[in-house]
Amino acid sequence: MSAKRTSTGTRRFGELARPLLTPALRRQGFAQHEIVTRWRDIVGALLASRSLPEKLQFPSAERTGGALFIRVESSFALEFQHLTPQILDRVNTYYGYRAVTKLILKQGPIPRPAPLRRQPPAPLSPEVERDLNESLDALKPGPMRDALARLGRKVLADPSP
């Protein structure tokens, strides 16, 4: 496995997972695993949040004219059906040839990604907090001053250069 190493000698998770995912996805008919991993890029954020490609099936000994099985949220299935021509166009544009000619929609729940946990910003030192408040003294109290104070706290608490 020739995965790129970072400066600390560790490897990126995506590079480690690719050799493990590829055989499993091939068994489902995905010769190129990117259709699953890049589904959001192919169909857009809205459609990707409501659907998930499950299997790509070709006629025997063919690599064109395949059927793409997609799980779609029940409440979104009719909209997805109306968008079938655009979705087929996007998928085939991704492949670079007319790989898929038919979408087979299966209604069902779509797994939701775990919500991102936000770290609360680090508290500012008393000196930095005082300097921030002094810089905002010229503004009268109100929503604008409060928004600038929140922004200032986030910027000043960010450790990145």
Image (cartoon, grey):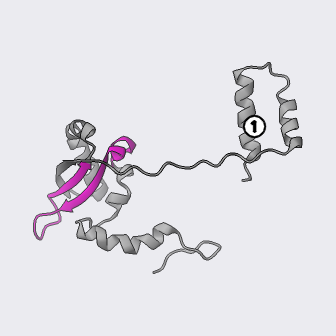
Residue projecting furthest to the left: 60
Report which residue position mark 1 lands on.
152
Task: Kindly identify the residue that appears in the image at 26 percent across and 65 percent down.
Answer: 30
Q: Is residue 48 left or right of residue 137?
A: left
Name the spot of residue 46 as percent of width and height, x first.
37, 41
Q: Determine the image quadrant of residue 29.
A: bottom left
Q: What residue type is labelled 1?
A: Gly
Viewer-side residue, 32 vs 98: 32
- Placement of 160 over or under 19, stated as above or below: above
Q: In which quarter of the image is residue 75?
A: top left
- Span colored in magenta: 43-71
* Residue 84 shown left or right of residue 137 in the figure: left
Whether residue 15 is in magenta: the answer is no
Indicate whether 63 appears above or below 126.
Answer: below
Image location (x, y in percent) of residue 71: 25, 50
Percent across and percent down for residue 107 are: 22, 46
Which quadrant of the figure contains the N terminus? bottom left
Residue plotted at (60% across, 47% down): 118
Q: Is mark 1 on a helix, strand or loop?
A: helix
Residue at screen point 33% across, 65% down: 33
Whether 50 is among the magenta residues is: yes
Q: Is residue 86 left or right of 46 when viewed as pictured?
A: left
The residue closer to the viewer here, 161 or 46, is 46
Q: In the figure, residue 45 lies in which quadrant?
A: top left
